[in-house]
Amino acid sequence: MTETPRPLAGATRQIETDRVVVTEWRFAPGAHTGWHRHEMDYVVVPITSGELHAFDGKMTTPAPLRAGVAYNRPAGVEHDIVNPNDFEFVFIEIELKP
């Protein structure tokens, strides 16, 4: 029996300037970003409260997030982000160009 592939999260670029890229990410239940590497420092502002799972290639780490409470990460982070919730999860990502 083959496993049903997970849907990909939807990304909508809202702004791009010479200094920042702002993207809205929408994750249906079970959706994921796909494996990726962040080439820029970034800030995430959750619009939804809930939990996302970050898979770093070795282990999955739960990340409880609260609407409006931002966090940041440096360039170089590699992972796949998954929505394990039974509801849509939304966040805004702000990438800082060097």
Image (cartoon, rainbow, N blue to C red):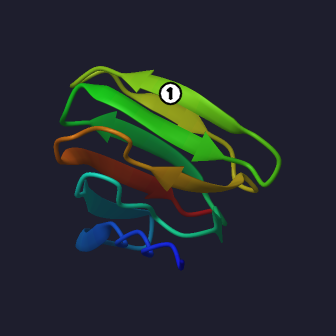
Q: Which residue matches tag 1?
A: 63
Give left or right: position of 13 versus 44. left
| Picture quarter with the C terminus | bottom right
| Picture quarter with the N terminus | bottom right
Residue sitting at the far right? 58
Residue 35 percent location from the top left of the image: 63, 68
Picture quadrant of residue 79: bottom right
Neighbourhood count class around disc 1 (C-alpha, 10 Å): few under 14, some 14–19, many 20 upward: few
Which residue shows up at 45% across the image and 64% down it?
19
Q: Which of 87 and 80 is in front in this view?
A: 87
Q: Residue 5, relative to residue 32: is it above or below?
A: below
Picture quadrant of residue 12: bottom left
Q: Which of 46 and 62 is in front in this view?
A: 62
Which residue shows up at 19% across the image and 33% down it?
48
Which residue shows up at 22% across the image and 57% down it?
28
Give left or right: position of 57 versus 98. right
Residue 54 percent location from the top left of the image: 59, 43
Q: Residue 50, relative to residue 81: is it above or below?
A: above
Residue sitting at the far bottom? 2
Which residue shows up at 50% across the image and 27% down it?
63
Give left or right: position of 17 versus 55. left
Q: Which amino acid does label 1 sit on?
A: Ala
Residue 13 percent location from the top left of the image: 26, 73
